[in-house]
């Protein structure tokens, strides 16, 4: 079974640009969560999607948005990039979120997209 | 605001040593605590703890939760160079209805020298 895949793996952008990151979950998984990881703040929750709907959101500005498609693939978008957006963006997939019968111990992470903003 | 604090932030040991990694938390409506190992990019799941005092064990790794004192430890015995990684602690808390989310600590960087 293929794992969670994320594209691109590396990305360099300049301030003010926008970026779209993609995540393909494990086959059969319908829940996708996004996280931002930086040395200073650690791993922080961005949002969670299940059945094409955003179910959960972290404390990030509106410049961060996402969506999920009918095949459960998800994209996240960051507009008007700032230097502080440089980070490793991880997505994780699971069959379902805990409230729908899933569990975080069945959540699998992808390898991440390393975004550098210059 | 939910808070998870891991300590120490980094440590260096020699092969064969035993290490104890700490995780303390302050969350409302605790549901579970999870440990992950992150070697290069993707964190991989190690343990999920929900009940106090019950040790989870997998090979040389073990973990225990104290819900009264609000902390967990991850022990690694007879360390090997392959144990070098960032160890993440995350706490699951319920916030509305059955919705829950994970709050992560900043991680502990473990380096095991031959």
Image (spheres, helix red, strand yellow):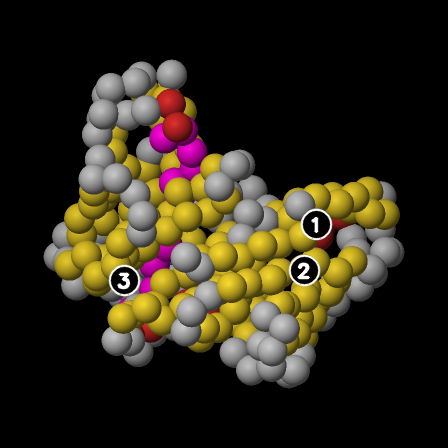
The kind of secondary structure element at disc 2 is strand
- Chain designation of label 2: B
Q: Nearer the N terminus, badge 1 or badge 2? A: 1
Residue designated by label 1: B8
Q: Which mark is residue A48?
A: none
**For the point 68% across and 66% down, which residue is it?**
B73
Q: CA distance from mark 3 to mark 2?
A: 30 Å
The kind of secondary structure element at disc 3 is strand
Residue A86 lies in the magenta stretch? yes
Vertical side of A85 occupied by B59: above or below: below
The prevailing secondary structure element of the residues shown in magenta is strand
Vertical side of B52 occupied by A105: above or below: above
Please give left or right for residue B29 compared with residue A68 in the image: right
Please give left or right for residue B50 compared with residue B96 in the image: right
Snapshot quadrant of residue A100: bottom left
**For the point 22% across and 51% down, which residue is it?**
A73
Residue designated by label 2: B22
Looking at the picture, tell me which residue is in the foreground, B54 or B4.
B4
The kind of secondary structure element at disc 1 is loop
The boundaries of the magenta stretch are A85-96
Q: Residues within 10 Å of mark 2 (few under 14, many from 20)?
A: many
Q: Are marks 1 and 2 in contact (CB under 8 Å)?
A: yes
Q: Is residue A116 visible?
A: yes
Q: CA distance from mark 3 to mark 1?
A: 33 Å
Callouts 3 and 2 in the same chain: no
Q: Is residue A106 visible?
A: no
- Residue B14 is situated, as x and y percent measured from the top left of the image, at 85, 47
Please give left or right for residue A84 compared with residue B73 in the image: left
Q: CA distance from mark 1 to mark 2?
A: 7 Å
Residue designated by label 3: A31
């Amino acid at each position: 079974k293929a794992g969670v895949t994320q594209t691109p793996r590396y990305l360099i952008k300049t301030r003010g640009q926008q970026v779209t990151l993609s995540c393909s979950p494990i086959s059969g998984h319908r829940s996708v969560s996004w996280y931002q990881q930086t040395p200073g703040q650690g791993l922080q929750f961005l949002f969670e999607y299940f059945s094409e709907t955003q179910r959960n959101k972290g404390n990030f500005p509106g410049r961060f948005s996402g969506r999920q498609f009918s095949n459960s693939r998800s994209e996240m978008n960051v507009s008007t990039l700032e230097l502080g957006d440089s980070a490793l963006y991880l997505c994780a997939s699971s069959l379902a979120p805990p409230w729908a019968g899933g569990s975080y111990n069945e959540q699998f992470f992808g390898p991440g997209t390393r975004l550098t903003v210059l | 605001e939910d808070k998870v604090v891991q300590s120490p932030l980094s440590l260096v040991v020699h092969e064969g040593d035993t290490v104890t990694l700490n995780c303390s938390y302050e969350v409302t409506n605790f549901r579970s605590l999870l440990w992950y190992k992150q070697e290069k990019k993707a964190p991989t799941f190690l343990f999920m703890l929900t009940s106090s005092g019950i040790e989870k064990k997998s090979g040389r790794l073990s973990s225990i939760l104290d819900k009264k004192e609000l902390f967990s430890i991850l022990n690694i015995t007879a360390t090997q160079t392959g144990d070098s990684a960032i160890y993440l602690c995350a706490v699951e808390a319920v916030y509305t209805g059955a919705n829950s989310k994970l709050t992560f600590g900043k991680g502990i960087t473990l380096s095991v020298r031959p």
